[in-house]
Amino acid sequence: MGMLVKGTWFDDDPLPADGAGRFVRPDSIFRDWVTRDGSSGFKAEAGRYQLVTAPSCPWAHRTVLMRKLKGLDGAIALLESDLPKGEGWAYSQGFDDLAPKGGAFHVHQVYSAARPDYTGRATVPVLWDRQSKTIVNNESSEIIRMLNAQFDAFGDAGIDLYPAELRADIDEINAFVYATVNNGVYRCGLAKSQAAYEESFEKLFAALDELEARLGRQRWLVGDRFSEADLRLFPTLLRFDTVYYGLFKCNRRRLVDYPNLWNYTREIFQMPGVAETVDFRSSWAITAGCATSTTASCRSGRSSISPRRTTAPGSPRPGSAIPRPSRRRFAPPQDDVSF
Ligand SMILES: N[C@@H](CCC(=O)N[C@@H](CS)C(=O)NCC(=O)O)C(=O)O
């Protein structure tokens, strides 16, 4: 995947893991806030901020969804990766004085522009301040909170996906969904040991069973309305059968095998504006490290250990019967998978 070391791009980087082989997601580095009144140093203004994303990334998808649902298309510019990954996320165009170099613009240019000696991954999403030419924030859970509440002068102030009376419940379910599902699929796919994979696999499917039961009792995760909790679960469910079932070996059941979760995902997909934010083809191809977003010819992983997985899912169709693996299959993660 590659990373920046003191502002210079290196193609190789270690997959972060603990001693037991569990994938450990690095913390996001840029954690400033845009506020309505500008007291944070970053005032909410139309045209001032640039959101840099990639269509395959579920974390970036959250921010694109919130921007769309809040009607902020005209206020916050969006740059989505539209080229195969090279030095990380790549784009056919840059913005302002951040221009393509050698035929492509890369998100790592945003990081080194903000902090010339930056060491770390160049992840999306990024919220960039065009005025002070720096990154405000690169943590999706915080960017969506800002878009939800701080830009009401420029978007739909009638929509509040994190209302005060539901915050405690939203925070609680968010923490559960993040640990077991959002990040859980990555902990399956990027585990470096059989034990770490099995641990995350069991937690993931126990959580999906619990969410399935919950959605049998209520239409939305919290209260009786669509909230930030639903917005955060949706990008992972959307990619489950096409990406995580096969690529990350999350293969006990498909999403279509859970009637409530499947209907819930379809309902959100049909909400006005949501389908426009979805790109299934590049979600699979780019996550898998494919050479282009429109072909299925992937680079092979460099691991010398052969995957033992024998069953590949076809294109999932509701109610279709596909061969199930008789047991969970672990395979070392590909080294060019995005996380
Ligand atoms: N905690 C971050 C995680 C973002 C993240 O890890 N994004 C991945 C893509 S899904 C990324 O950009 N990885 C760097 C790469 O693939 O080159 C957030 O939620 O914003």
Image (cartoon, rainbow, N blue to C red):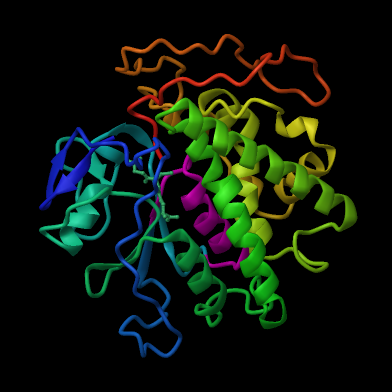
Residue 94 on image: x %, y % = 26, 50
Whether residue 91 is visible: no
Q: Look at the image and give the residue range highlighted in magenta.
A: 52-72
Residue 72 on image: x %, y % = 53, 67
Left of 1 or right of it: where is 211? right
Left of 324 or right of it: where is 219? right
Viewer-nearest residue: 58 or 271? 58
Viewer-nearest residue: 318 or 212? 212
Residue 157 on image: x %, y % = 63, 79
**Residue 86 higher or lower than 49, as above or below:** above
**Residue 295 higher or lower than 177, as above or below:** above
Does the magenta run of residues contain 68?
Answer: yes
Does the magenta run of residues contain 331?
Answer: no
The quarter of the rendered structure image containing the N terminus is top left
Classify residue 228 by image quadrant: bottom right
Residue at the image position 79 percent from the left and 36 percent from the top: 258
Residue 69 on image: x %, y % = 62, 63
**Residue 47 higher or lower than 207, as above or below:** below
Whether residue 292 is visible: yes
Left of 286 or right of it: where is 9? left
The quarter of the rendered structure image containing the C terminus is top left
Classify residue 193 by image quadrant: top left
Residue at the image position 37 percent from the left and 83 percent from the top: 43
**Residue 26 higher or lower than 192, as above or below:** below
Viewer-nearest residue: 52 or 15? 15
